[in-house]
Image: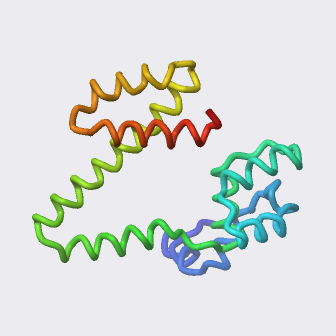
Amino acid sequence: MQVTEKELIEVLRNPEEIGRFVKRKESILEKYRNFIKEARRQGLSYRVIAEILRKKARIKVSESAVRKFCHERLGEPYARKMVRNELAQIYENITLEQKRKATAARREFEQDYADYVFVKEAYRRGHSQEEIKAFLMKERQDKDEGYISRTINKAISEIGG
């Protein structure tokens, strides 16, 4: 018996019909469903949940696997898409000058964060605060000494130095 293309297209119009052909693989996370649901309700990130599962349940799981499980199996919305769409609408309604200022502020924030990450890594690798400060003073001539000192102090205090 030969099937026509029209009959195949009819299968595509009926989700229940498609479901008969697709087998859903059972997720290893399914038995931790209640834990994951409660952890997300308490505001834990996918990364933290994955870490707890790796250490306590001794299962090999990634942050992206937990994220996918939450979206596909627990029905969590994809918040970033919603935020991105809202930001796109706002961005359409601002002037070119406002866009330039926003872009400059974002770049400034990204550079400040990069400085912060650099300080933490340099300190972890054994460089002294004076060496780090001298390097940043040379590289970031647009910043004053107070900014550099605050960045260094904040980064080092977070890693317990």
Can you tell which quarter of the image residue 93 is in?
bottom left
The quadrant of the rendering that contains the N terminus is bottom right
The answer to whether residue 3 is above or below residue 107 is below
The answer to whether residue 30 is above or below residue 123 is below
The quadrant of the rendering that contains the C terminus is top right
- The residue depicted at 21 percent of the width and 53 percent of the height is 104
- The residue depicted at 29 percent of the width and 70 percent of the height is 88
- The residue depicted at 80 percent of the width and 57 percent of the height is 29
Q: Position of residue 51 (x, y in %)?
A: 75, 47
Q: Nearer the viewer, residue 135 or 111?
A: 135
Q: Position of residue 128 (x, y in %)?
A: 50, 21
Lateral position of residue 141 relative to residue 12, left or right: left
Q: Nearer the viewer, residue 24 or 83?
A: 83
Lateral position of residue 143 relative to residue 158, left or right: left
Q: How many marks?
A: 0
Q: Position of residue 71 (x, y in %)?
A: 63, 67
Q: Nearer the viewer, residue 44 or 27?
A: 44
Q: Nearer the viewer, residue 59 or 11?
A: 59
Q: Position of residue 61 (x, y in %)?
A: 75, 46
Lateral position of residue 140 relative to residue 113, left or right: left
Way the structure is coloured: rainbow
- The residue depicted at 15 percent of the width and 58 percent of the height is 100
Lateral position of residue 123 relative to residue 104, left or right: right
The answer to whether residue 93 is above or below residue 117 is below
